[in-house]
Amino acid sequence: MNRTAAKASGITAFVRDLLAPLEARERPVISARYGLTGAEPETLQAIGDHFRITRERVRQLEAGSLKALRARSSGGSALASFTRTTERLLKESGGVQTEAALMDGLKKALGDQSLAAVFANHATLLLELSGAARRFVDSAGVWHPHWYLSETHRKRAHEFVRKAAAAFARGRSEAFAAGESGRVLATVAKTAGVPL
């Protein structure tokens, strides 16, 4: 999806065209699961209740639809461009970005004019299809949702945050208050193996 195409049609039109060949029962499942109609993404159970099918059947429909979409879009230049943009943005930030930062960066890079929440839902589907990045969502609520290029990148970022938190706990917060935060973060980053 080049910048001009994104401005002219937006991510919404691209995803709509991508979903067009799906069977009539598959499109609404994918739309509900990813929140493509502007609503929040729905759970398997909520979708199953709506269509009077089991959660397992919804999961099967979703898996089959994603497989078909991956096959259909594998050679497409628009998804390839989206993937390259995603990889570039993640590499620029050390391989990991919060979901909000990545979505904002993608939206700006593509020049998309849709609402942020609408863009994020559609971009999440494209990220799933591209396989360029993986999403980390912590059910315990400790970490913000974020996307990463590889498990190595995710582990390095998590280690950095753990060490920074430990530095605060050991009383280094005075160094931050004294304006030496750059030195403390550089030391933590070096020990965590995170390039700054």
Image (cartoon, grey):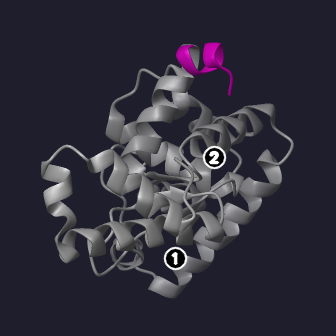
Sequence-first disc among 1 and 2: 2
Vertical position of residue 102 compared to residue 25: above or below: above
Q: Position of residue 167 (x, y in %)?
A: 28, 70
Q: Verify whether residue 88 appears in magenta.
A: no
Amino acid type, mark 2: Leu
From the viewer's side, name the closer residue of 41 and 178: 178
Q: Verify whether residue 5 appears in magenta.
A: yes
Secondary structure beneath label 1: helix
Which disc, if any, is residue 58? 1
Amino acid type, mark 1: Val
Secondary structure beneath label 2: helix
Q: Which residue is drawn at 25% across and 47% down?
A: 180
Q: Residue at x 41, y 72 (%)?
A: 51
Q: Give the residue at mark 2.
A: 19
Q: Residue at x 69, y 53 (%)?
A: 132
From the viewer's side, name the closer residue of 192 and 25: 192
Q: In the rendered structure, which segment of residues is drawn in magenta?
A: 1-7
Specify the principal SS of the magenta part. helix
Q: Quadrant of residue 70?
A: bottom right
Q: Residues within 10 Å of mark 1 (few under 14, many from 20)?
A: many
- Could you tell me how far apart the alpha carbons at marks 1 and 2 are, in whole angstroms? 17 Å
Vertical position of residue 89 compared to residue 36: above or below: above
